[in-house]
Image (cartoon, rainbow, N blue to C red):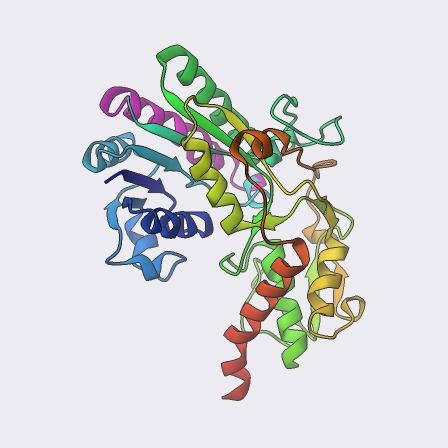
Amino acid sequence: MKRALITGITGQDGSYLAELLLEKGYEVFGFARQESWYKPNCGSHLKGKVKILLGDLTEGVDIANAVQDSQADEIYHLASQSRPGESWARAAETLTVNGMAAVRLFEAVRHHRPDARVYNASSSEMFGQSRENRQNESTLFHPVNPYAAAKAYAHQMALIYRNSYGLYIANGILFNHESERRPLHFLTQKVAYGAACASLGIMNSPDLNERGRPIVENGQLALGNLAIARDWGYAPDFVRAMWMILQQDAPGDFVIGTGEQHTLSELCEVAYQSVGCDWKKCVFSDPVLVRPLEPGCILADPTKAKKMLDWQPTVNFENMVTLMVQSQIERLKPLVDS
């Protein structure tokens, strides 16, 4: 039986990946902070099915212990400070968690489990204001926020450890991927939540935004720049790609994305239209929520993944957004009925 260790098992990707690996017969270990694991999280339903190793990513001893205790054949490093927008206010912490923690993991693998295969979660945010219309594995990085810079550092260190020590470390450069399990502070989930509130007639939502205000206030959802465009895919498709990357004979880097781009306005239109509402009457752009510097054209060229991994997305943009909206309606409906 293969063993796998997942950092970030309490998050969206970690929980979906754990389910996939369990279905494939793996013994799954999760690495998480005690306070994260014992409060409700995306992986709460996995209790009793996976073995949890408690620790902190910023502590090299904790990571080394997890590598030794799990004796994993495959290690998926997914944990991070996951909010690019928030990284402006937490730049130093973001570098520690998203950059240095990866290096500590690589060191632990080098000393304690050199035969393990390691997946490192890179990000399309690293491309930033790319001069290319589509980004692939050869596109130069041009990060424009602390989150992206820290991810680029970890990505480059993965290459250094791979080439210097002969370790099997693969980078998955994942474009935006969403699902029903996204926390509410993520942009796509806010839109799904706003559409659900509109559908249920909720004028002032029970859940609050980062500023302590209702996410939907007086029937209005505040967002940032509505013109931003992203390549959005469905998270379960993307974690399947993670597994496929580690099944290759040699480690490599892979861009994973749909190859289709949609604006935030389109996202709003699809979400509100799925419940028969006009998004323009329910959504407005708040200058306070606009990032200091936005990435440019971020659009995946997943040719390599499609050719070498035989990977294809199975859920399209419209269906993904509809699934997210319906999930929020199911969550909020008992509050309306009570």
Q: Quadrant of residue 158?
A: top left
Q: Quadrant of residue 297?
A: top right
Above-or-below relation of 33 to 179: above
Q: Please tell me whether residue 95 belongs to the stretch shown in magenta.
A: yes
Q: Residue at x 36, y 56 (%)?
A: 43
What is the magenta range? 88-114
Work out which residue is located at the far top of the displayed protein and give it: 164
Q: Nearer the viewer, residue 94 or 44?
A: 44
Q: Nearer the viewer, residue 98 or 20?
A: 20
Work out which residue is located at the far bottom of the displayed protein and give it: 338
Q: Residue at x 48, y 36 (%)?
A: 94
Q: Is residue 215 visible?
A: no
Report the label total: 0
Across and down, in percent, residue 338 comes to 49, 88
Q: In the visual, does 133 lie left or right of 76?
A: right
Above-or-below relation of 157 to 133: above
Across and down, in percent, residue 241 comes to 49, 40
Q: Residue at x 65, y 21 (%)?
A: 140
Q: Nearer the viewer, residue 271 or 108?
A: 271
